[in-house]
Amino acid sequence: MRNKLTEMGKKQLAFYFDSSSCSGCKTCQVACKDKHDSGEGILWRRVYEAAGGDWVKDGNAWVPNVYSYYISMACNHCVEPLCLYSCPNNAIVKNDDGIVLIEKDRCMGCRYCEWNCPYGALQFDKSQGVMTKCTFCDDYLAEGKKPSCITACPMRVLDIGELEELEKEHGKSNEIFPMPRAHYTQPAIVVKPHRDARMAENVEMKIDNLEEIKNEQ
Amino acid sequence: MRLSAFFSGGLLASGSLLGCLQGEEGKGQIVSVNDDGSVIIRAGCPSHNCGGRCVLKLHVRDGEIVRIETDDRPTDDISDPQLRACIRGRSYRRRQYHPDRLKYPMKRVGERGEGKFERISWDEALEILASRLKRVKEKYGNSAILVPYGTGSYNQTNGRQTAARLMNLFGGSLGFYNSYSWACISRATPYVYGTSVTGNQRQDWINSRYIIMWGWNPAEMRDGTNSEFFIKKARENGARVICIDPRMSMSAVSLADEWIPIRPGTDTALMSAMAYVIISEDLHDKDFINRCCIGFDKSQMPDGLEEEESYIDYIFGTKDGVPKTPGWAEEITGIPARTIIRIGREYGSIKPAMLYQGYGMQRRAYGEQPVLGGCVLAAITGNVGISGGWASGIALQVADGGPLWNVFPTGRNPVREMIPVFLWTEAVLRGKEMGPEDGVVGGDRLQNNIKLIWCVASNILINQHSDVNRSAEILKDENLVEFIAFQDQFMTPSGRFADLVLPVCTQFEVWGLQDGWKYGDEVIINPKIYDPPNEAKSDYRICAELSEKLGLKDEFTQGRDEREWIEWAVNHFRNTRFPEIPSLDQLHEKNRGVYSVPVEKPKVALSDFRDDPENNPLNTPTGKIEIFSRQLYDMDKPDVIPPVPKYIQEWESPFGEESKRFPLQAVGHHYMPRVHSIHDQIDWLEEAFPQRVFINPLDASDRGIKNGDQVRVYNERGEMVIPCRVTAKIMPGVVNIPQGAWWTPDEEGVDRRGCVNVLTSHKWTPLAFGNAQHTIMCQVEKA
Amino acid sequence: MNSNEWPLVFFTLLSQMTAGIIIISFIVGLFVRNSELLSDFELKRNYFFVSLVLMVIALAISFFHLSAPLQSVFALANLQTSWLSREIFCMSMFTFLIAVCCAAVKFGIPGISGLPYWHIAAAFTGLLLVWIMARLYMIPIVPAWNNYATMIGFFTSIFLLGGVALLVILVVTGGKSFPFDQLKPVMWALIVVVSLAVVAKLLNVFLFQSGISFTGGSLPPPEAPFSWHVIHVIFFVAGFFLLAYWAYSQMQHTELYRPQMVYLSFALLFVSEIFGRAIFYALYYRLGM
């Protein structure tokens, strides 16, 4: 049952994100808000600041064992979208490009999908009373343009492509902290990890800017 | 569906867009029309002196900007990269349509500083300002007038330069030099190199093998659009990048291979120890030093000063008995000696290498020293005048010093006396007593104390000047400054102290023009998108109307409106930096937003000198790179202005008595959501980057502070209460309060927003008379 | 816990209590078949009617949880994969069957005279409903919910609240004149049910809920206010001992003994369950970001 969508030989668009050079400037976040006129607290794309480690006093010197990097994250338009499976109203659909979209007119605002998404992609808009999420700027795709966040990035670390091709080019990499294990939903994203990302296994990393994420309202 | 078409002016004449789509001569503009009927207009990001210059792609519908995107030129290569706007520009709709924008002229009704105003007409407002100007001129003379430093607007027709022009025609106003950004680096660099043009074009950065970002955070503050992108490219090209900063900045995370935290204010100690390593391990470029420098060792000392302390004497402690070893520097900087040795070796041996100095470390007590120290390190390693190298210092761009920033002609100021800009409150209190010992130039003494301030596009009166509480007390006293006019887009903390408030339109509502900021070979146009709302006017328009009341209209306007001045400015660029630039009409018609000159072969600063120092001498007294400066020696203040760069313990430091009461060093870094104090009220930016005190977990736990707690930050000058962010990304012993938050005192005078200047000191640096705003000790406790 | 989840606390508790009334009344009916009381028309009318009212309230509350309730017409569209769709379907069936039971009792409508069959159908639907409800919360990325504690917890609520609620209905229906010597088996049966629920609850807390791990996520571990835990436990203990004391006392009497104690006990246990359920929602925590 769960695999009702995956038999398709259809396209699966995906995000590419180079965390190794992301400065955490959040221009992508605001470009998204501006394009979609998102209300307060709605962050279809948001930037997580992973940080961990500590300081060691060495004589008169301070030695930092401090690690940090940024993860810019929108919806990963998963191959196995738990949000879609969970929606009672069939208000969430996956289109021919593999883009997961909410049909606003069918959403009753029960927020069950929000519980089911491990990426915090589903966000409730109080003013409209419906769930909202990243649309991959499907309107721009139709015009032959890339999504707003991609062309906004001053560091040029965001891109899009077909999942298979991106994985061929960069390898499969989709479980960088704080991302969950990929097997839950098979996210359509390839992340080039920052060198500090490997520290997540040895050092306790946390999200340093949690108050800026606000995906629970 | 996208439709590109050429619209004649008449085709869209029905809408309120007429003004923007149609040149004043009826010229058309190539615009795209979206499905929703919006048209696309490319414009410069409103110029606020952020340090970048970018292109915005505005979607305009029914006279409203409904979406903002950025430069979408099809090519994005390194010779002419897209000028992609940052989060500040992309949030601009929230500023443009902010409900708090000033709408009408107002005059004060309460006490000064109380912030109570009532609406008046433009005619009354300009009459008041004109009569006050005339009265002060008659009573005291023009030198009692100040149009303060301010960089809020920078597009030629908006900004303080318009008022400066009018005042110069009116008989002048008190002059000033320096800036709040880079007083020390602009003053000190020429002592070494005889010029400020020490920077290679940025495209050359990719040729570097080793880059030290020393207190430099281009990913967060703007230091030229795309600077962070160029560093990324250099790294991709094989450069190793390290970042020296008390904070693990956004640049340290995203651009650097290694972060080296340093105790603020100790940069010159680290530089000296690196020099110790380089020289003692024989890694210095002896040939270059011999050919191009003086003052390195005894053999190179100026005539008659052979017995004075040379650079190498200082480094090895020959005279003062203190060798500047890595161990010595470890105690001061907090950096392990082994790390100092390693980076000293790296910088001494990897060629070519760049030591890029940020400006934060020179906004400190003795801020001249790290500037000189960085230049000297670049010189002794022979990284001057070569591709991939970097001479350090202020590094204006070769060959012509780079962008002009402001070309709007202000004319000559008949008042010849100038103060260092940071000392304006001194000139309010004791201007007549001020002379060369206070940095006054152009005359022996000032003729007047400041009696009238006309504050245009500036938040310097309160928010951005040191020691807010002191400034507020000074400005409240109507016997000191008799009249304050304030001209801006929002009611800032400075505006609250005004007697007269004049509303200014944004840069989207007036014609404007900008060139690149420090770097960049481009001219960006700001077409007028629509008429200003309510009663707002451009700074130029306000000055033009005021000039009528002062009887100076023809001289001031020369018959030009704003657009005609922009035409004038385009012509000026054609005659100076951009001979090929098309006319304004053509620029407007193309609707690309930007005219750029690709840099295919980046130029290298000081290469002529390096190749042949005898025939291409520098503009220093000796014609060489002056590691030892006789000019500085002659000032005869060796403790604070040494002739070779030295580490000097700051007047507020963790090593002084003051640290017992105030043990934490505070810095106020340039924060992602703001340009200085601009954008502080923008919700999207506050959501992305809230104002916080950033504190290390060790310092926090000592004080029982948990992440998110409200904390009190204070010293003897002031206090604030704001939430904290506990993060390991800042060095122990250091707290960071991002600068630019709007001073918001409660009834007890405690700032509730986190304006770092409630803590900063009014003391200035010895050589440049510059602001030392980052030299602060403070204490933090749970509120 | 998000404020929009408070309706869910009441919705789940009320519907689980109703399922409890229907299921327990059926089970008890099997064991005390001879009792005149349970076949008493008035009693049946009361507990079916109360059940129907409770379900109507529960459904109404559930709408408060929706921000676009009109769109709920689509709510059965995804029975294929959505547990929520299934819950809504089952909930509707359950309410419908209770309504039929009410109709059968009240009006003796021809064709639905076989009340026991409708009752058994409603009881099984009630069981199914609570099972689906539990599955709905057993989301793979939510460690605090994705375990048997959720299942056991929900079923515990059925028997705890349903048992006591039925007792209340019994007492209210009987009133002063009730022949309590005849009531003893029923009462004993209900006390046993409630006691079993209490044991299950304790086991659940110690065996499952205490072992929930939040590792593997990046968000800070969830917390419920300490006061909620205190209320949850104290009210539970107080309610249970009060009930036990009443049951013991009632055994000594032939007439109805201080029915206020039953009401109070019910109120205490219900409040305890409210906070217990609120804690459950507060422990929502997802793996990931």
Image: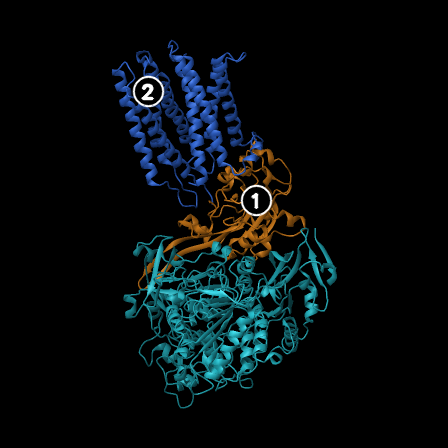
Q: Which residue is mark 1?
A: A188
- Asked which quadrant contains residue B363, the reply is bottom left
Relative depth, front residue between C41 and B214: C41
Residue B344, compared with residue B257, is above or below; it is: below
Q: Which residue is mark 2?
A: C191
Mark 2 vs mark 1, CA separation in Å:
55 Å
- Residue plotted at (40% across, 31% down): C149
Q: Secondary structure at mark 2?
A: helix
- Measured from the top left, where is residue B776 in percent x and y? 36, 68
- Measured from the top left, where is residue B469 in percent x and y? 37, 68
Horizontally, is A128 left or right of C194 in the view?
right
Relative depth, front residue between B768 and C262: C262
Q: Which chain is cyan?
A: B
The hue of chain A in the figure is: orange
- Measured from the top left, where is residue B437 in percent x and y? 39, 84
Q: Secondary structure at mark 1?
A: loop
Contact between marks 2 and 1 (CB within 8 A): the answer is: no
Relative depth, front residue between A183 and C197: C197
Kind of residue at disc 2: Ile
Residue C261, compared with residue B512, is above or below; it is: above
Dot 2 crowding, Cα within 10 Å, few <14, some 14–19, many 20+: some
Relative depth, front residue between B33 and B371: B33
In the image, which is nearer the foreground, mark 2 or mark 1? 2
Quarter of the image for the C terminus of chain B: give it.
Answer: bottom left
- Asked which quadrant contains residue B258, the reply is bottom left
**Chain at numbered mark 1:** A
Q: Which chain is blue?
A: C
